[in-house]
Image: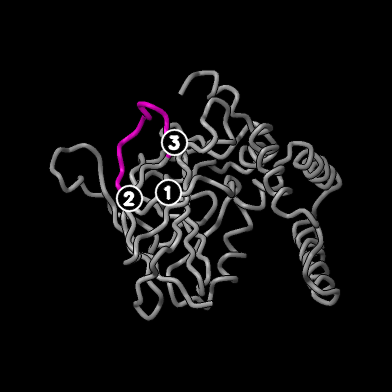
Amino acid sequence: MTDITTEQATAAASGAAATERFRSRHQSGHTSAGTERVDTLATELITAVHDIVRRHQVTYAEYDALKAWLIQVGQDSEWPLFLDVWIEHVVEEVANENREGSKGTIEGPYYVPGSPRLPAEATLPMRDGEKGTPLLFQGHVTSVDGTPLSGATVEIWHADNDGYYSQFAPGLPEWNLRGHVVADETGHFWINTIEPAPYQIPTDGSCGRLITAAGWHAWRPAHLHLKVSAPGHQLITTQLYFRGGNHVEDDIAQAVKPELILAPIPVADGKGDGNEVTYDFVLDKA
């Protein structure tokens, strides 16, 4: 990746892209919750804030600093980043608590619908000479009763070897390391890609200022993003991580689950050119 790409992958640019993507997918802006539900949730949220103010004797200086920071989050277009990093993992936990099949986790702010459709044995779109360790990601998609799901869709996206996502950093091809892979008649798939890198969430904007002020780190472990679906079954959104990788134990987004950690091994051909991992998805019936 060129220096200009690194220099221009700013919080402002990334935040604006994430906000625009979210708006394009949720045009109406209206909640599907009823009045009573909104009343309950909003009242309890505001009451919880009141309790924090009282318990910690929040000063006007601290209140004004919070107000200024909240305004800046909006101006930086970082609400998708803030919510996806610090809130979404709990929403996902509640939403998927009754699933019998594969574990889910957060979608994150860098999802883009409409990636290229690819066959069961596929190589993700990438640049000539794409940096990174080659990775064969393979697996099987079944229903909870063990039935293979012919034609299941495995949608995948991930960061490159420098920790950047296409459509959120300049200089990357539009669909770099993104694709919809359609499993074969037995539910199997084989995806050739490269191992992603750990990365810091953008730190030059409002979220970065919170991280610095609180003394936190900004790192996410290397991971593959997946949305797996099949007719008559519930879509699962998840991420897969790499055993022994940096920040698997202290992910800033708190999205890692033991069931989602992969154990890469050298490719079976013995040539030493990359690693392979296997992960089978089990989908709940709709």
Q: Main secondary structure of the magenta part?
A: loop
- Crowding at dot 1, Cα within 10 Å, few <14 / some 14-19 / many 20+, comes out as some
Q: Which of the 4 image quadrants contains residue 269? A: top left
| Residue, disc 1 | 118
Is residue 111 depicted above or below 227 in this figure? above
Does the magenta run of residues contain 133? yes
> Mark 1 and mark 2 in contact (Cβ < 8 Å)?
no
Pick whichever, 60 or 145, lies toward us.
145
Residue in the image at 78% along x and 38% along y: 72
Q: Which residue is mark 2?
A: 121
Which residue position holds label 3? 160
The disc labelled 1 sits on which kind of residue? Leu
Work out which residue is located at the far top of the displayed protein and give it: 3
Name the kind of residue labelled 3 in the image: Asp
Which one is in front, 232 or 208? Answer: 232
- Which-is-in-front pick, marks 3 and 2? 2
Q: Which is more N-terminal, label 2 or label 3?
A: 2
**Where 231 sits versus 246, above or below?**
below
The residue positioned farthest toward the left in the image shown: 270
How far across and down, in percent of the image, does residue 246 sit?
39, 44
| Percent coordinates x, y for residue 221 in the rendering | 44, 46
Residue 84 on image: x %, y %: 62, 52
The stretch in magenta equals 125-137
